[in-house]
Amino acid sequence: GDYIWLMVTLFSTLIPTLLHLSVAVLTLGLQYPAGVRNFVAGLLERGEQSGQAALLSGICICAMITIALWCPIWIFTFVVTHDHGAIVNAVLWGFEAFAWAIGGI
């Protein structure tokens, strides 16, 4: 309770981190699974001739973006709720120990 300001500061820095992680997941999803990349690229190429391929490629790209945005949020939620916040309490303890070591407390 005394260090609520520290938790607010930590969580406010996690928002840009989650956004950067989302971009990284999207980049990995678009580049490295060659089967997925080739499948979506093929759909995009066939999209000019077929309306169905254009629709399917749009659905695939939207799904990849949605997964990329939600994966970091799911991971973050797991970390916060796992074992009644044990990981969050451990992080808070680490920062409190560091603040104590440098004389901030």
Image: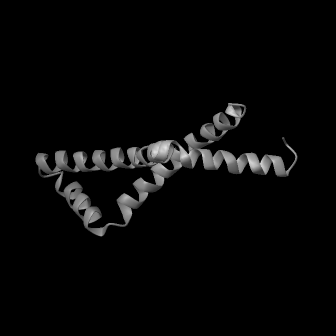
**Residue at left 82%, top 47%?**
100
The percent position of residue 59, horizontal first and vertical second, equals 23, 45
The percent position of residue 54, horizontal first and vertical second, equals 18, 48
Query: In the current view of this chain or complex, which residue is farthest to the right?
Result: 103
Query: Who is closer to the viewer here, 67 or 41?
Result: 67
Left or right side of 57 for 87: right
In which quadrant is the C terminus drawn?
top right
The scheme the figure's colours follow is one colour
**Residue at left 25%, top 58%?**
40
**Residue at left 11%, top 47%?**
52
Q: How many marks?
A: 0
Query: Who is closer to the viewer here, 31 or 11?
Result: 11
The percent position of residue 7, horizontal first and vertical second, equals 65, 37
**Residue at left 13%, top 52%?**
49
The percent position of residue 97, horizontal first and vertical second, equals 76, 50
In which quadrant is the N terminus drawn?
top right
User: Taking the image as drawn, is residue 76 in sight?
Assistant: no
User: Taking the image as drawn, is residue 11 in sight?
Assistant: yes
Q: Is residue 37 above or below residue 68?
A: below
